[in-house]
Amino acid sequence: TIFDTPEEGCRRIAHSIATTIREKQKTGEKAVLGLATGSSPIGVYQELVRLHKDENLSFRNVVTFNLDEYYPMQPDALQSYVHFMQEHLFRHVDILPENVHIPDGSLPIEKVADFCAAYEQLIEEAGGIDVQLLGIGRTGHIGFNEPGSGLTSHTRLVKLDALTIADATKDFIKEEFVPLRAITMGVGTIMKARKIIMMAWGEGKAPIVRQMVEGKISEEVPASFLQQHERVTVILDQWAAAEL
Ligand code: GLP
């Protein structure tokens, strides 16, 4: 679906997520959301906060799993995805802290593998992800699944691509401050979500959006695996859609 502006696209996505939350609430179930960071979802979170304040959208029955976190990263650092999520969504709504899950970038290296296995387990125990929100990196990554990430990859420690590090420099002042690694849900973890909403805004994303939607399915563009998912909606603005 192509919108004139990112704002319209973000509103559409937020309303779709709100519908899932409300439907689950009616049946007394928890809504399990897979959440993304980066600049792309900020407008989605703004609209969700507005719906919470103006239209009684409650997050008390919502469980969230974030896609990824830099490694190493302290949760209270300004660039952490923990901080990002608090600032843009969690501190403005009534979500219960025990229902929020974000990969822990502060663990010692020898504990990371067990943490990743436990993260997968927690998603399973929550009943699986109902809606997974995704942005896309210019390398074709989803979460931090860089080129070379396989279809069945799971939550794990990965190395960031040089282009991803260059793109992240705006948040870290200097390139040398950008962590070289991250903990990310795998492509396989993402593909298990019952519904996926992928968003991209701006002309900088147009070439990779074309590869994702119309290109060959391959590990070279991990987002291309989404072509094999049964319920994925791609929401674009006119500029991100310009090369389709
Ligand atoms: C980071 C995140 C991704 C996100 C990507 C694009 O790498 N780990 O989940 O999709 O950035 O970021 P932006 O939305 O700022 O373009």
Image (cartoon, rainbow, N blue to C red):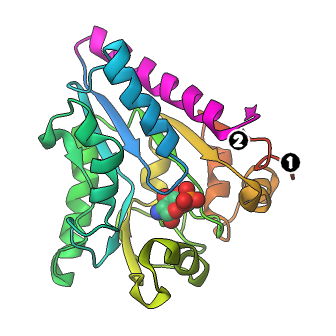
Query: Which residue corresponds to the image point at 26% horizontal and 64% vertical from the top-left?
Result: 116
User: Left of 198 or right of it: where is 110?
Assistant: left
Which segment is the magenta one? 1-28
- Look at mark 1 in the image and give the residue it sits on: 244
Q: To which quarter of the image does residue 141 belong?
A: bottom right
Residue 100: name its quadrant: top left
User: Does 92 appear in magenta?
Assistant: no
Q: Residues within 10 Å of mark 1 (few under 14, many from 20)?
A: few
* 115 over 99 or under it: above or below: below
Mark carried by residue 236: 2
Q: Who is closer to the viewer here, 136 or 90? A: 90
Q: Contact, CB < 8 Å: mark 2 with mark 1?
A: yes
Instruction: Name which residue lies at 61% across and 63% down.
Output: 222
Q: Nearer the viewer, residue 38 or 109?
A: 38
What x and y, as percent, mark residue 177?
39, 86
Q: Secondary structure at mark 1?
A: loop
